[in-house]
Amino acid sequence: MITATPPASRVLDALGNQTRRDILALLSQSPLTVGSIAAHLPISRPAVSKHLRILEEAGLVAYQSSGARNIFYLNPAGFQEARAYLELFWDEALSNFKRAAEETEQGNDNL
């Protein structure tokens, strides 16, 4: 049975929320402050901060302080955990497809 590693579990859990996916989509366009993110979403600044904290704990975002503001941006390294986990399924799916195709071909040869 394939189970996610703890870092991959945090990433997948973080990605399970639509608001956090919306925040990631915004950050994929450019780094933003909490206020800028909140201006694009129907939630409060404190709620944005909470979601950003979860995304940061999952390693998906990071921030740089600029005066009294934090500017958030995507952390590409954080996405590698989820990618590695999903590739396990992709590799398994390809192996199963190859085996099924070979079995079908062998079955056709016996006709």
Image (cartoon, rainbow, N blue to C red):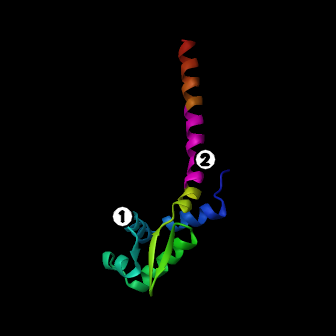
Q: How many marks?
A: 2
Above or below 6: residue 64: below
Locate residue 86 relative to residue 42 in the image: left or right. Answer: right
Residue 90, x across and y down, in percent: 55, 43
The amino acid on which the numbered mark 1 sits, given as a three-letter code, is Gln
Which residue position holds label 2?
A: 88
List the single residue furthest toward the bottom. Answer: 68
Overall secondary structure of the magenta section: helix
Q: Residue at x 31, y 75 (%)?
A: 40
Residue displayed at 52% across by 77% down: 53
Using the rendered view, name the quadrant where residue 18 is placed: bottom left
Residue in the foreground of this view, choosing between 55 and 70: 70
Magenta stretch containing residue 94, yes or no? Answer: yes
Q: Is residue 53 above or below residue 109?
A: below
Q: Which labelled disc corresponds to residue 29?
A: 1
Q: Earlier in the sequence, mark 2 or mark 1?
A: 1
Residue 31 as seen in the image, left or right of residue 84: left
Where does the image place residue 77, in percent across and percent down from the top left? 56, 60
User: In the structure shown, which secondary structural element does the residue marked by tag 2 occupy?
Assistant: helix
Callout 1 crowding tier (Cα within 10 Å): few <14, some 14–19, many ≥20: few
Q: Residue at x 52, y 68 (%)?
A: 14
Disc 2 marks a residue whose amino acid type is Leu
Region rendered in magenta: 83-97
Are discs 2 and 1 less than 8 Å apart at CB? no
Queried whether the magenta region covers residue 62, the answer comes back as: no
